[in-house]
């Protein structure tokens, strides 16, 4: 009995030890789990690792060929899809510094139209390689410079003839002959016309095209400056004879001239406001200003008023050079009006379809 108890004693002693060990281990596990829970709660919600998304951007290569020889000039690489043609021109200028962006003309086809600077590259792409044809447009000038030069010349040239320089007219005749009031009035009206053009160029008109070839400015200056010299020479000549119907003819013609000048100004202001108001594009509508009511009859009333000014000036001065100039202006303005009228028909057909281009019924 004693031996059996002695032999059983160790077993009895081992059991509590083993039981105690198990309790201590479970206690440690509970404590570790508690600590881990506290750590999780203090750290916030568990977040799954973010998945990295690699956005793959496709770049384009623009191959630029000479329009005449079809030889490759350069390749503009790594062009983003959001780039415009103007961005390509700037990169092309870096590769070929002799051609700055304003004189670079790019075409999709050799006989096709020149692409606008605002065209998006992605809209031209059929594949990752875009082929464009290059044309050197020559020396370019800005539109503001173009019109300031074109209109400043006639203003100064007319004044040189008005003061009757001795190098132009005979000094004896100039001092003898009396100047008719229409000569002074014609100088005032002529200067007013070109001063209005200059002020509108600076403060009213917004030119989106950017540039035009220098040769166009030379042709425009030759036309306006040449005719101004011819007109001013006749009107300011010491032997100039006043109009046939005297004061009444001059007064009515001067009134018509001033009304056309005012109408032209108000129409240009209305067109500038319509083009840059930021609202939805729509055809200009007449306002409370009576000079804008011509929009009810024609689509290009600014050309109508311009022609009216020169016809009135012809009647007021009754000279052949002014009449020829007015006739040429009617032809030129009618061509511009027809071209603009076709554009208006595409954009604003319901509002323009019953209107004439420049002169009601006739054009």
Image (spheres, rainbow, N blue to C red):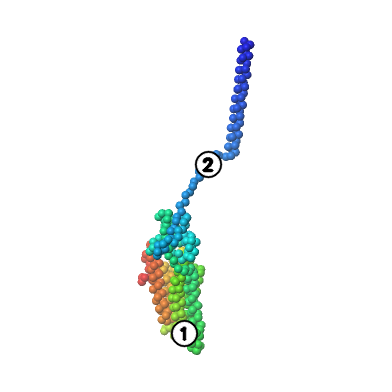
Q: Position of residue 255 (x, y in %)?
A: 45, 77
Closest to the observer, 245 or 110: 110
In which quarter of the view is residue 342 placed?
bottom left
Are there few (<14), some (14-19), or many (20+) residues within 10 Å of tag 2? few
Give the residue pinned by disc 2. 49
Q: Position of residue 115 (x, y in %)?
A: 42, 62
Picture residue at 44% right of the left edge, 84% below the top: 242
Q: Position of residue 231 (x, y in %)?
A: 44, 80
Left or right: residue 209 versus residue 16 is left
Discs 2, 1 touching: Cβ within 8 Å: no
In which quarter of the view is residue 226 placed?
bottom left
Picture residue at 43% right of the left edge, 54% below the top: 128
Residue 259 shows in this picture: no
Left or right: residue 31 versus residue 309 is right
Quadrant where the C terminus is found in the figure? bottom left
Among numbered discs 2 and 1, the one appearing first in the sequence? 2
Q: Secondary structure at mark 2?
A: loop
Closest to the observer, 57 or 20: 57
Are there few (<14), some (14-19), or many (20+) residues within 10 Å of tag 1? many
Quadrant where the N terminus is found in the figure? top right
Q: Secondary structure at mark 1?
A: loop
Number of numbered discs overlaid on the protein picture: 2
Say which of marks 2 and 1 sits in front. Answer: 2
Picture residue at 63% right of the left edge, 19% below the top: 13
Left or right: residue 223 versus residue 3 is left
Q: Give the CA distance from mark 2 to mark 1.
A: 92 Å
Closest to the observer, 125 or 47: 125
Residue 60 shows in this picture: yes
Closest to the observer, 354 or 184: 184
In the displayed orientation, state which residue is furthest to the top: 1
Give the residue pinned by disc 1. 237
In the displayed orientation, state which residue is furthest to the left: 362
């Amino acid at each position: 009995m004693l031996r059996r108890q002695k032999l059983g004693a160790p077993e009895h002693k081992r059991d509590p030890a083993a039981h105690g060990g198990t309790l201590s281990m479970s206690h440690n596990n509970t404590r570790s789990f508690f600590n881990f829970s506290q750590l999780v709660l203090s750290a916030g919600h568990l977040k799954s690792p973010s998945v990295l998304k690699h956005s793959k951007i496709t770049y384009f290569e623009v191959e630029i060929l000479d329009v005449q020889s079809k030889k490759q000039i350069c390749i503009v690489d790594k062009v983003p899809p959001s780039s415009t043609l103007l961005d390509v021109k700037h990169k092309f200028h870096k590769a070929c510094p002799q051609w700055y962006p304003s004189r670079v003309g790019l075409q999709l086809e050799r006989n096709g139209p020149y692409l606008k600077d605002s065209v998006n590259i992605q809209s031209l792409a059929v594949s990752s390689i875009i082929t464009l044809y290059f044309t050197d447009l020559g020396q370019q000038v800005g539109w503001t410079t173009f019109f300031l030069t074109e209109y400043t010349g006639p203003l100064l040239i007319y004044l040189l003839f008005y003061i009757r320089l001795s190098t132009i007219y005979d000094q004896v005749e100039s001092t003898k002959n009396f100047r008719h009031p229409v000569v002074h009035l014609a100088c005032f009206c002529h200067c007013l016309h070109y001063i209005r053009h200059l002020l509108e160029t600076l403060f009213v008109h917004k030119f989106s095209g950017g540039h035009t070839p220098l040769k166009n400015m030379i042709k425009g200056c030759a036309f306006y400056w040449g005719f101004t010299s011819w007109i001013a020479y006749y009107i300011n000549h010491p032997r100039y004879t006043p109009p046939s119907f005297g004061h009444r003819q001059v007064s009515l013609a001067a009134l018509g001239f001033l009304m056309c000048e005012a109408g032209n100004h108000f129409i240009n202001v209305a067109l500038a406001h319509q083009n840059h108001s930021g609202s939805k594009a729509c055809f200009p509508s007449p306002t409370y200003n009576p000079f804008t009511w011509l929009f009810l009859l024609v689509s290009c009333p600014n050309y109508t008023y311009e022609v009216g000014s020169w016809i009135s000036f012809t009647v007021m001065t009754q000279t052949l050079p002014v009449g020829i100039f007015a006739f040429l202006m009617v032809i030129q303005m009618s061509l511009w009006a027809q071209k603009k009228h076709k554009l208006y028909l595409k954009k604003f057909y319901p509002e323009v379809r019953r209107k004439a281009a420049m002169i009601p019924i006739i054009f």
